[in-house]
Amino acid sequence: MNHNISSVLISQRSFFKEGKLLDVGFRIEKLKLLKSVIEEHESEICEALFQDFKKPEFESVLSETAFVISELDYIIKKLKGWSKPKKVSSSLINFPSSDYIYSEPYGACLIIAPWNYPFQLAISPLMGAIAAGNTVVLKPSELAPNTSQILADILAKVFPTEIVAVVQGGVPVSEALLEEKWDYVFFTGSVPVGKIVAKAIAPHLTPSTLELGGKNPCIIHKSAKVQLAAKRIVWGKFLNGGQTCIAPDYILIDSSIKKDFIDAVQKEITAAYGINPKESPDYARIINEKNFDRLAEMLEGENCQIGGETNREKLYIAPTLIDEPKLTSKVMEDEIFGPILPVLSFSSEENMADIIANYSKPLALYVFSEDKSFSEKILKSYSFGGGAINDVVIQIVNKNLPFGGVGTSGNGAYHGKHSFDTFSHKKSISKRGTWLDVPLRYAPYGDKVSLIGKLMKKF
């Protein structure tokens, strides 16, 4: 397998050197073909996602296929403009000159995709890499085998392997891939695996984007519209069976409205999934037994105000709300990544801050409040990847917003132009004129010290 990976990488580097990917028109044609093939196979993609973890068709279209097609349209429309050298203001110190920023591809890129949104989180960075003029080796998740296979089939119809190659397999394959020297690595997954990736590529000083996760707080102020907050939180938390890196991980709510919120959540869960969510066609399952066991362990000994039912054979965990778990409990240790929602109350902002301080910088943070000063204070007080006020998850759909983490929740960002920029090295170029050459900088320096100091400070 390692030999095969090396052969693919050699062929991709050879093709890259030919310079064909520097042709923006060539890239656009490939992206248009990719869009066409995805549209042609959309129903099969949705079926693969259902086979992998019972993902509802609506959610598959919303968060996987339509999401990708929309971003492809945007990139295709804007790519020519993004690719042109950008003129910037020149420094008078360099007069006469014209200064530019050139975007150039890195070369051979490795993209390692996760299982929770196995189509979107593979194709979205890949389209950015291709738009910027790179070659790609894609490693989809072995935990979503049906989606991984259709990814391989679709990409084979669009790209020869010297441009895009899909390498399937488990941990040994990932390890073999990381033994190679890449020009850029893009990884989406858990914090522990992100650390392994970072360590593996460090000897080569390989630039990378790491899209990780964390415990995302969702703060509900006493001024919030409780019923609407519950409706939006239930949707965003239990979307994809709770297996979303930017889902609310735990609720921090003013103690005066906690009971009303719990009642509202129960009402909204029933409205969305019925009295028995296990029978709902709109509720996804846990990806595998390992993750099921990890989540089921979090429920042990906890006060489940809503839900709590499990079925290992069906990989089913009910939409669950845990009331006031201890910060030392399993459910509050790390990112949950499942349909379990802890609710902790606070009596003061200091009390709330003490709870948040137990965790590293999260990928997302949410605030529900009609008090704008409170919301703004929260946004300025905490460091996190991105978020929303009076909603959850929605920040991801705006192509103008960069999506990424900070600190242990990741580094780098993508979506829209940010994807193009992530996979492009920005080359700074000064074009000097030859009709004038000011002698100030040349030796002998003599008494030029004071003059050059004044000029540098001014300009």
Image (cartoon, rainbow, N blue to C red):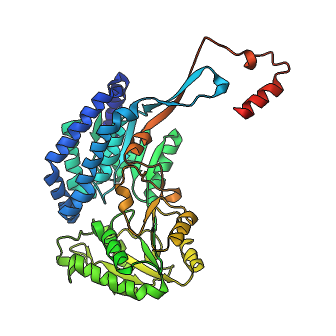
Q: Quadrant of the C terminus?
A: top right
Q: Quadrant of the N terminus?
A: top left
Coordinates of residue 85 in the picture (x, y in percent) = 45, 29
Question: Residue at (39%, 59%) from the top-left corner?
Answer: 395
Q: Is residue 439 visible?
A: yes
- Position of residue 355 in the picture relative to residue 85 (left or right): right
Coordinates of residue 282 in the picture (x, y in percent) = 20, 70
- Whether residue 406 is situated above or below residue 165 in the rendered picture: below
Residues 11 and 254: in front is 254
- Position of residue 282 in the picture relative to residue 305 (left or right): left
- Whether residue 289 is situated above or below residue 411 in the rendered picture: below
Question: Residue at (73%, 31%) from the top-left corner?
Answer: 456
Coordinates of residue 172 in the picture (x, y in percent) = 35, 50
In the rendered image, which quarter is residue 348 located in? bottom right
Q: Is residue 300 visible?
A: no
* Residue furthest to the top: 435
Total tally of numbered discs in the picture: 0
Residues 173 and 102: in front is 102
* Residue furthest to the right: 447
